[in-house]
Amino acid sequence: MFSKNQLGFFYMFISVCAFSLMDVIVKWSDTYPVGQVLFFRGFCGIIPILFLIPRDRYLDFYKTNRSSLHFKRCFAGLIAIVSIFVALRNLPLATVVSISFAAPIFTTIFSIFLLSEKVGFYRWLAVLVGFIGIIVISEPGLSDLNFYYIYPIIFCLGLSYVAIAIKQLSSTEPVWLISFFFSLSILILSFFTFYQNWIMPSFIDLLLLSMIGILGGLANLWLSQSYKFSDVSLVTPLKYLALVFAIIFGYFIWDEVPTTKTIIGSLLVISSSFIIFRREMVLNKELSRPRHE
C-alpha cells in the first residue's frame, strides 16, 4: 500500500505529464482555429467529470447557490485559457511554461484585495524576484515588438483570480461542479467562433484534438487529488518538471533551444514561487490551485 504522500507525488507527477502533453498538442494544432481547439477542450473536458458526479445528483448536479462567483471564475478562466493557447502557438514552449510559473505571484497580490490577506516581507520579496524574472524572459520579445509575450502574463493574471475564486468556491462546492461549469463555459465560447472557418480534421487529428480536452480535464482532477493526499508544499516542486518537459519537447519537435535569458528568468520565477510556497507552508495555507481551472 502507498502512503498518502506517495499517492500525492504520483498524482502530481501524472498531472504534470498530462498538462505537458496537452501543451504540446495545443502548440501542434496551430493549423486549426483557436475556437475549434477550444471546442475540443470544453467538450472532451466534460467527459472525465461526468464519471465523478454522485448518482444521487444526476438530475440536479448543476444546481448552485453561488452562480455569480461561478460566472466570475469561468470568465477569468476563459481569459486565461485563450491567452495560453495563443501564447503556445506563437512562442517557444519553454518560454511560455516559464512565464506561467509566475501565477502565484499575481495570486499573492490579488489575495490582498480580494481576501484581505496580509502580505509580509518574504512574499513581497517573492513578488519582486518573480517580476524581475518575467522581465528577463520577455525583454527580447518586447524590444522586438513581439507582443505575444503579453499573453502568458495575461494567463497568469486570469489564473490568479481563478485561484482566489476556487478557494472561495471550494468551501461549499464540489470540485467536479467547479470543473464542469468551466468546461461548459469553454464549450459555449467556442460556439461563437464558427465564422473562423473551422477545418474538418482527419481521424488522427480528431483523436489528438480530443486529447486536449481529456488531458486537461484529467490533469486538473489529478492535481486536486494530489493536494488532497499531500501537503501543497511537499508536492509542488514536481510541477517544475513541466519546464524540463517543455525544453525536451521544444527541442526535439520544434528545434527550440532555450536562450540564456529564458533559463535565468525561469530560475528567478521558480525561486519566487518557492519562496511563496515555503511561506504558505509556514502559514499552513493552500495557495496553489489547478493550472487551467
Image: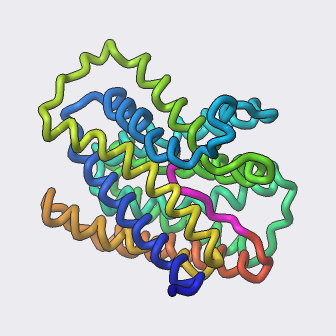
Q: Main secondary structure of the magenta part?
A: loop
In the image, is 185 to the left or to the right of 84?
Answer: right
Look at the image and tell me whether residue 139 can be seen.
Answer: no
Outermost residue to the front: 56
Colour convention of the picture: rainbow
Measured as percent of width and height from the top left, residue 175 is found at 64, 51
Q: Where 31 falls versus 284 (above or below)?
A: above
In the image, is 251 to the left or to the right of 284?
Answer: left
Measured as percent of width and height from the top left, residue 102 is found at 54, 62
| Residue at horizontal 61 percent and vertical 69 percent from the top | 227
| Residue at horizontal 64 percent and vertical 47 percent from the top | 162
In the image, is 178 to the left or to the right of 259?
Answer: right
| Residue at horizontal 33 percent and vertical 44 percent from the top | 146
Outermost residue to the top: 195
Look at the image and tell me whether residue 253 can be seen.
Answer: yes
Q: Where does the magenta region start and end?
A: 286-293
Res. 74 image quadrant: top right
Residue 287 magenta-drawn? yes
Measured as percent of width and height from the top left, residue 28 is found at 21, 46
- Marks counted in the figure total 0
In the image, is 67 to the left or to the right of 100?
Answer: right
| Residue at horizontal 17 percent and vertical 66 percent from the top | 251
Residue 163 magenta-drawn? no
Measured as percent of width and height from the top left, residue 170 is found at 74, 52
Q: Where 16 falls versus 81 (above or below)?
A: below
Res. 66 image quadrant: top right
Q: Foreground: 205 or 164?
A: 205
Q: Where 90 falls versus 221 (above or below)?
A: above
Q: Where 258 falls versus 161 (above or below)?
A: below
